[in-house]
Image (cartoon, grey):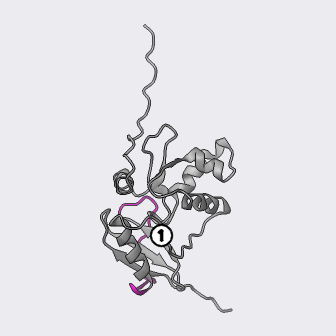
Amino acid sequence: MTTTTTATYWTELDSPVGRLLLTAAPDGALTSLSVPGQKGGRAVREDWRHDAGPFRAAGEQLAAYFAGELTEFRLPLRAEGTAFRERVWAALDDVPYGETTTYGEIAARIGASRPAVRAVGGAIGANPLLILRPCHRVIGADGSLTGYAGGLERKTRLLALEGVPAPAPSRPVPPPATPR
């Protein structure tokens, strides 16, 4: 029996939001973009191959994005997830540069029920291609800044880069006062 393993290539790039870890499949399709401290982010594994070659176009496009000169990435992406997650991630790709949407709007775009908004949030939080697949453009229904696997500070910086006024962070609503 023959077992084939697929090589994973990786490189790191500096950016205004910190060091970026990129991974790619042998055909050059990007499989992840992670940042330090990212919830669920990737870490370099011993069996990966360090090679900047497959990432030249990604590096150029990310540099142009951070310089405010690029509004849409044109890179081969390959993120693997459940069919539901892949539908959510595809909907993220349709959120234009400089605009925001809500978790509920993403749920509606993919035909998910209103109660599925939490699952949509989970799928967005599991997006392995930060920045390239713009989960930073998703905000709360009340317009507040909500979770981001890369951290709210990075989300705020990415939105500001795109010219979006920073929404306020979401805060828990205090319980109603009890009558005396």
Q: Residue furthest top?
A: 180
State the predominant SS element of the stretch in magenta. loop
Q: Residue furthest bottom?
A: 2
The residue closer to the viewer here, 80 or 94, is 94
Q: Position of residue 126 (x, y in %)?
A: 52, 59
**Quadrant assignment, res 175:** top left
Q: Residue at point 41% right, 67% down?
A: 70
Which residue range is magenta in the image? 36-53
Q: Residue at point 56% right, 59% down?
A: 94
Helix, strand or loop for disc 1: loop
Q: Which residue is mark 1?
A: 73
70 up-or-down from 151: above or below: below
- 6 horizontally vs 155: left or right: right
The residue closer to the viewer here, 22 or 110, is 110
Q: Is residue 44 magenta?
A: yes
- 111 horizontally vs 140: left or right: right
> What amino acid does circle 1 point to?
Phe
Q: Residue furthest front?
A: 69
Q: Residue at point 39% right, 43% down?
A: 167
Q: Residue at point 52% right, 61% down?
A: 127
Q: Is residue 157 magenta?
A: no
**Quadrant assignment, res 62:** bottom left
Q: Position of residue 155 (x, y in %)?
A: 39, 54
| Tally of numbered tags | 1
Res. 44 in view? no
Res. 134 in view? yes
Q: Position of residue 17 (x, y in %)?
A: 32, 62
70 up-or-down from 111: above or below: below
Q: Position of residue 49 (x, y in %)?
A: 43, 85
